Structure formats: C-alpha cells, structure tokens
Amino acid sequence: MPNSTQQPPRLLRVAVAGSVILMVAAGGLFYYASKVAGDKRKANAGNEITVTIHPRSCEPNALTVPAGRTAFRIVNASDRAVEWEILDGVLVVEERENITPGLSQVINANLEPGDYAITCGLLSNPRGTLKVTATAESDARAKAKPSMTAFVGPLSEYRVYLSLQGSAVIKNVDALAAAIAAGDLAQARAAYAPARAAYQRIAPAAQRFAELNNAIEARADYYENREQDPAFGGFHRLEYGLFEQNSTEGLAPVAERLQADVASLKTQLLAQPIPPEQLVTIVSRNLNTLASTRAAGEEERYSHLDLNGFAANLEGARKVIDLLRPLLEKSAAGLLPKIDGAQKAFAERLDALREGDGFKPYDQVGEDQRKGIAQAAKALADQLDGIDPALGLSAL
C-alpha cells in the first residue's frame, strides 16, 4: 500500500512544474507580441513624423507635410501627461489626450491642404505650425467628392439638436452658478451632475473649438501649477472646489466665467457649420478618447461622476447614428446591425452600473468593469468609422 504522506510532495512538484511551463509559455507569448509590435514600429518608422513635447515647447515646432494621411508619433519628454492637437484656426482637426510622461502615442491624421497650428503640451506653451501642401491626389479627391445634397437634412437636424442641447447646458450651468452664489454646497453638488451631462451630450461638437473647450473643461494637468494655477477654471475647477475642497468659497467668479463661456459656445456651435465628413469623425474621436483616457477615471477625478458623462456621450452618438440611418439603409444596410449591436453593448455596460436614478460613483467601479467600458466604447467607435466610406465621404 503506497504511503499517503508521499502524495502531497509529488503533487506539489507536478504543480510547480506546471506553473513553470505556464510562465515560460506566457513569457514566450509576451516576447512574441513585443517582437511583433517592435517590428511594426520599425516598419512604420520611416513613415512617421516624430514630435517631442518638452516641458515648455515641442520639437520640431514647424512642420511641412503633403496632403493625405500622415502619422505623427508624439513623444512626451515632459514630467506630466500632455495633449497634442492640430488646429485649423479655432477648430480642432486631430488630437490625442493624456500622453503619459516618457511614452509616445501615434496620431493618424487625414489632412487637407492648408496652414494649421499645433499645440505643444501645456496650454500656456507657444504653439507650433503645420503646413500641408497640395498634391495631385488631393486635388483629384477634392473634385471627386460626392454631392452634399443628401446630407442637408441630417446636418440641419443636428444643428437643431445642438441648439436645444446648448440651451440645456446654459440652463443647467445657470442653476449651478446660482447655488454657488448662494453658498449652498449641497445644492451646488447636486446641480453639477446635470450641467456636466448636458455638456457631454454635445462634447464632440464642442471639442472642435480649442480655446473655448479648454476654458470650459480642461483638466488641471494642462496648467503649469495644476489646481493652484490662476488660469485653471471651468467645470473641473468647480468640481475641485465642490467635491475635493468641500466648499463654494471663491467659486462664484469661476461659475460666472463658465456661464459666459457656455453662452459663447452655443453661439459658436450655430455659427460654425459641421462639414458632412466631420459629423461622424467628431463622435468617433470622442468615443476613442473615452476608451483610451477617460475610462481610467481621469475626467471626473474629484466627483467620480464619470458614468453620467459616458451615458451622455452615448446619447450624443445615438443622435448622429439616427440622423444618418436613412442614408445608411440605402447605401450600407449591412453596417447598421453592427453599429446597433455595438451601441447596445455599450449601453448594457453602463446600465449594469446604474444605482437609483443615476450611476455608481466611479471610484466604486472595478478595474475589469472599467476595461469593459473602454472596450465597448472603442468597439462602437470602430463601427462608426465605417460610416464615412460607406457614404462616400472618405475624402482622403
């Protein structure tokens, strides 16, 4: 009869051996994945333009590229997370937020001929320039653009939506400012959530206006002295005071400035028409930012009301999808079930975290749930990226 006391050591040796095999296999997979990623970076290195963000400047700060697709690798050599934007006047053409210190991210931009500006980290840093030169291909594509007649209806309806939602933002910010002026902390906290959600419904369109959007919702990271910087204002300065400092003291001037800025935003939203080829792009960009940055809890770091904003972003995306639905039913009926499936999956992720009339505080949302939200937002963005080609709007 075998000695039973010998079995556990034997089983232990087998378990240890199995663990070693799994570790070796995992290491091999990691090495393979790293090698593939490295090979891709090497293959694309010659096609990328590297821009390095230093604490007070970017290098180079003057670029010239041909029209069409260009990949920019943005290297953060500063000591804090930064953003990088391509600006056409006051409008944001492309951007990448929250680039981690010491790391880099790639922006793939489709650029029309013209002169642009580029931001260089902190909002106080001087801007660089980007000149995009015309090519035979860009001239040919410009001539081959589809008729815009079919998009008049959707764009007009979206303009009405922006007007209504812009009014909702103004109304909710006015209520927030009134509570702050009265020194009512509880009421001001309660008013913050609907004001923020109203803004997030139109955030894709609002984020086209670089200066105005920064004044309204830039995070403290983008100011030299962070929360203590005199220029730090907007929603997140109010959020910091109400939820971190637990006080309305000193917030009245910030709230008054926010009132003026959101009123100006509504005017700009109606004055600057959105080209058909940008309607889906701005929504997709917003969802990609949610997936890459905001799902980690960067946005509402003091109030933890992130989920309210995510749900509002989804509402705004649904509006654009529904406006384009008749055109897609004619030109790309097969794409619609994929889009609808992706938006349903995103909604289910959010609905699972509802609590009462709202959502769970985001600091109570686990890491796996946050990853699931990010993946769902990215999946919807990926499906939306198929709309422009299906409607003949891929100009570049």
Image (spheres, rainbow, N blue to C red):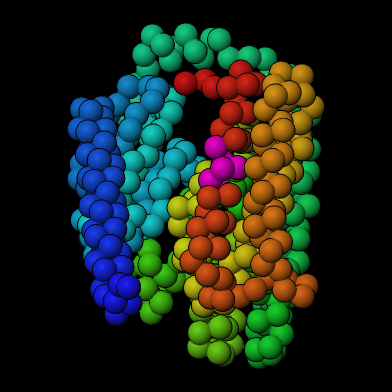
x, y percent for residue 168: 76, 60
Q: Would you say residue 76 is visible in this rendering?
A: no
Magenta highlight: main SS? helix
Q: Nearer the viewer, residue 351 or 250?
A: 351
> Which residue is found at the position 28% from the left and 45% from the top?
29
Q: Is residue 136 magenta?
A: no
Q: Would you say residue 383 is visible in this rendering?
A: yes
Quarter of the image where one finds residue 177: bottom right
The part of the chain drawn in magenta is 377-382
Q: Is residue 92 left or right of residue 339?
A: left
**Count of numbered marks:** 0
Residue 184 lies, with reference to residue 374, above or below; the image says below
Q: Is residue 231 left or right of residue 163?
A: left
> Which residue is found at the position 72% from the left and 33% from the top?
337
Q: Nearer the viewer, residue 261 or 1?
A: 1
Residue 155 lies, with reference to residue 16, above or below; the image says above
Q: Quadrant of the N terminus?
A: bottom left
Quarter of the image where one finds residue 134: top left
Q: Nearer the viewer, residue 33 or 380?
A: 33
x, y percent for residue 363: 53, 75
